[in-house]
Image: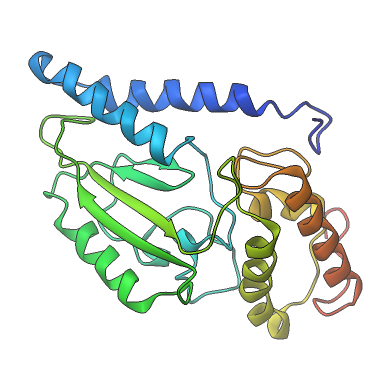
Amino acid sequence: MIDMYGMAFRANEEITNGRRDAMGKLLGRSIDVDRLKYSTSVLRDILDKHGPVVQAYPYWHPLVLDDADHKSPETLPSDRCGYHGLDHTVYLRGGLITCPYDGGEAILKSVAELSARDASKGIAYITAEKINAQLYHPNTQPVLITCEWQRPLNRDGTIPTALAVPLLLEREMPAWRGAQVAETWKTMAPYILGRPSGSRSSLFVNEETGQALKTLWNNLINTGMFGPIKVGSW
């Protein structure tokens, strides 16, 4: 598959590289030798269940929905969308692993508050639990945050069109009143598809869903609701 810059999007290669990098980051810093085998097993199980490793989420994804400022899309969990205490974090399609030095209390409290606010309105639940294994450093407390979808996903774990389209619409509609220009699909694709991505697919959405999102976006900006379409640098 060719991406928007003329390069092939190699999903399997991205999955392999992401897993390798995550293993290196979380197991490569001073893990006690007698704990390394167990930590490796625990991490592999988490990656198998909640992976693959990703670089950024679609800005309509439940993990980054709790964002009061709709002027700029959030694609990574942070203070700006309700997460406090993240440190040394690896992002997964179905959640994230973070390794703070504070015992994990701040991030556990944050996720509990996020769950109570339920920004996705029942589409997905965000939960967090401590990981009983050494990851990143013996003095950190690893925490696993997961996104538990309440609607069926595709068999390959990607998000179906029936979920992706309404989530994008709900995320984008509040922004139209203050919008001044409309961004093209080429600009918005990494925000809408997540990263890594090609021109119409990513590790979050397959090509069918990606094409539906692209068609939807082009239809929206062509109405003029966001203002004139931005072409080049203004």
Q: Seen from this angle, which residue lies furthest bottom?
A: 177
Residue at coordinates 60% horizontally, 42% vertically from top-left?
A: 195
Q: Seen from this angle, which residue lies furthest top?
A: 33
Residue 30 shows in the view: no
How many numbered tags mark residues here? 0
- Which residue is more in the foreground, 7 or 46? 46
Q: Is residue 120 above or below residue 197?
A: below
Residue 171 position by quadrant: bottom right
For the C terminus, which image quadrant? bottom right
Residue at coordinates 68% horizontally, 79% vertically from top-left?
A: 173
Residue at coordinates 25% horizontally, 68% vertically from top-left?
A: 112
- Which residue is more in the foreground, 79 or 120? 120
**Would you say 57 lies left or right of 201 here?**
left
Q: Is residue 118 above or below residue 234?
A: below
**Would you say 113 lies left or right of 64 here?**
left
For the N terminus, which image quadrant? top right
Residue 12 position by quadrant: top right
Q: Estimate the x, y position of residue 84 in percent, counting from the top left.
A: 28, 60
Q: Estimate the x, y position of residue 177 in percent, counting from the top left.
A: 71, 86
**Would you say 73 lies left or right of 109 here?**
right
Residue 146 shows in the view: yes
Q: Is residue 49 above or below residue 40?
A: below
**Would you say 202 lies left or right of 132 here?**
right
Q: Estimate the x, y position of residue 97 in percent, counting from the top left.
A: 32, 42
**Which scheme is used to colour this image of the protein?**
rainbow
Residue at coordinates 34% horizontally, 41% vertically from top-left?
A: 89
Q: Estimate the x, y position of residue 141 in percent, counting from the top left.
A: 15, 42
